[in-house]
Amino acid sequence: MRTMLYPGSFDPVTRGHMDIIERASRLCDRLVVAVLHNPDKRGALAVEERVRLLKKACAALPNVEVIARGGLTIECAAEVGAQAIVRGVRPLGDFEPEYQMAQINRALGGVETLMMTTSEGLSSISSSVVRQVASFGGDIAQMVPPGLAQEITRALAGE
């Protein structure tokens, strides 16, 4: 069974994330989406809420599993038996830090990283843009998975 890991903060999940999840899920038998807790970052949403939203967004993808983990990505990859790590890359400066992380993960754990470019029309969407638009009462429906805009807006407002 070929397993891949898609790690991230998903704070909150966006259509860009889902694009990568859907495309990557077609390339493997099992895709583990890991909400990684970074102690150096204060998330807008609790990790549990991010996992809940991702599970709802991924419900129609039978080979996708959503988990929460702390620690190093490479440790999570080993724990789930991943042969590769998937990363989404936007044309807005993502490549250099992702390349560096891919090199580190290969050196630490021998796991390859597959970098997938964003689909057309999604490259300007980021979790930080979603948070900012929502904080000003803007409509985020075109930026997040279908049916989750109200839930994400409420969660970001602390309701």
Image (cartoon, rainbow, N blue to C red):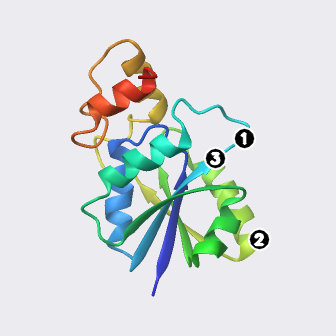
Packing grade of label 3 (10 A; few <14, some 14-19, many >=20) is: some
* Mark 2 lies on residue: 107
Observer-side mark, 2 or 1, equals: 1
Q: Are marks 1 and 3 in contact (CB under 8 Å)?
A: yes
Tell me residue 159's x, y (percent): 41, 23
Residue situated furthest top in the rendering: 136
Residue 1 placement, left or right of 149: right
Contact between marks 3 and 2 (CB within 8 A): the answer is no
Q: Is residue 91 above or below residue 110?
A: above
Residue that appears at 58% across and 79% down? 81
Q: Which residue is more in the foreground, 98 or 48?
A: 48
Q: Amino acid at mark 3?
A: His
**71 horizontally vs 58: left or right:** right
Q: Amino acid at mark 2?
A: Ala
The disc at residue 39 is 1
Residue drawn 60% across the image and 51% down it: 36
Residue 4 in the figure: left or right of residue 64: right
Q: Give the structural element (helix, strand or loop) at label 2.
A: helix
From the top left corner, tell me how far across and down residue 133 is, in percent: 38, 20
Q: Residues within 10 Å of mark 2 (few under 14, many from 20)?
A: few
Q: Residues within 10 Å of mark 1 (few under 14, many from 20)?
A: few
Image position of 146 with respect to 32: above or below: above
**In this picture, is 97 found above or below 125?**
below
Quadrant location of the N terminus in the rendered image? bottom left
Q: Callout 1, which amino acid?
A: Pro
**Residue 146: in sight, yes or no?**
yes
Which labelled disc corresponds to residue 37? 3
- Element marked by disc 1: loop
Q: CA distance from mark 1 to mark 3?
A: 6 Å
Helix, strand or loop at label 3? It is: strand
Residue 89 spot, x, y in % from top left: 48, 50
